[in-house]
Amino acid sequence: MTDLPHLSDLSPRVAALLAHPSITERRPPAADPWPCTGPEPPDLAALYAATDGLVLADGTTFLRRGELARATDWLKHDSSLDWPDDLVVLGEQHELVLVLDLDLTASRAGGGILEAPHDGLATFQRIARTALGYLEQRTGLLPGDPAPEQRLADAITAGDIPALRQALAEPLYPGTDRQTALAELTLGRLLAAMGDETAATEAFERSIAARARAAPRGAAAIERAAALRACAAAARQAGAESLAARFAARR
């Protein structure tokens, strides 16, 4: 996990969150110890020091601290999941399971708060870096601390070159190669439209590589060909006809 503020620095944020009208249920703090592998993140410690779980008006539910390990073990057993020990079920949000990734092995881009559909519990989307930040986003209280993948999605939509470069420079959560490919494709198109064909070519090449990494086994060549066509189309859309022709000519 990334470096987080001290517990005392988080208390005002927790107080503001719990005073928000979107919080429809909160519970008295409990004496249950942190039940999971690895240290308790400071933001969760601050949250559980004020309320033992909560419910939002939109149905988002955070479990009691004492329920976390049992809920995680039950879900792993019931769904035959081979999750690592540092993934913890925090609660749910409609048809999604909320999961805390502690990333104790530093192998998953620092971990954070993940969402996984009930029918796809091996497919994660990282939403925020911390549980408190996630709740701030859900309530609309503050932007919270969105995950790089969320900032990347926003930058793609906005067509923001500096934001794209900044988000792409950060470690991204495993399984985001398709999003990376789209981001690099978008960046390449924007750079081509500015006349920077060298930088555009580099972005397009990274897009092709990311799309090939995301391909199912045995389909990398097909995905690479599709990625080349996408780069040619993006360059053409940007008015860079010579660049488009170079990618269109490749096989």
Image (spheres, grey):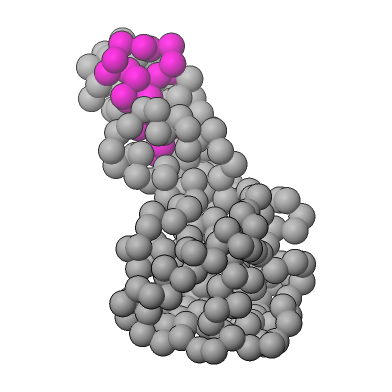
Q: Nearer the viewer, residue 165 or 47?
A: 47
Residue 180, image x, y percentages? 47, 40
The residue positioned 54% from the left and 89% from the top of the image is: 28
Q: Is residue 164 above or below residue 55?
A: above
Quadrant in the rendering for residue 4:
bottom right
The residue positioned 32% from the left and 17% from the top of the image is: 192
Magenta highlight on residue 11? no
Q: Nearer the viewer, residue 139 or 174?
A: 139
Magenta highlight on residue 195? yes
Q: Is residue 73 above or below residue 39?
A: below
Q: Nearer the viewer, residue 79 or 162?
A: 162
Number of callouts = 0
Q: Quadrant of the N terminus?
A: bottom right
Does the image show residue 191?
yes
The answer to whether residue 82 is left or right of residue 241 is: right
Does the image show residue 231?
no
Residue 3, image x, y percentages? 65, 50
The answer to whether residue 2 is left or right of residue 24 is: right
Which span is picked out in magenta?
A: 182-201
Residue 201, image x, y percentages? 43, 18
Residue 87, image x, y percentages? 66, 69
Q: Nearer the viewer, residue 20 or 107?
A: 20
The residue positioned 59% from the left and 77% from the top of the image is: 48
Q: Main secondary structure of the magenta part?
A: helix
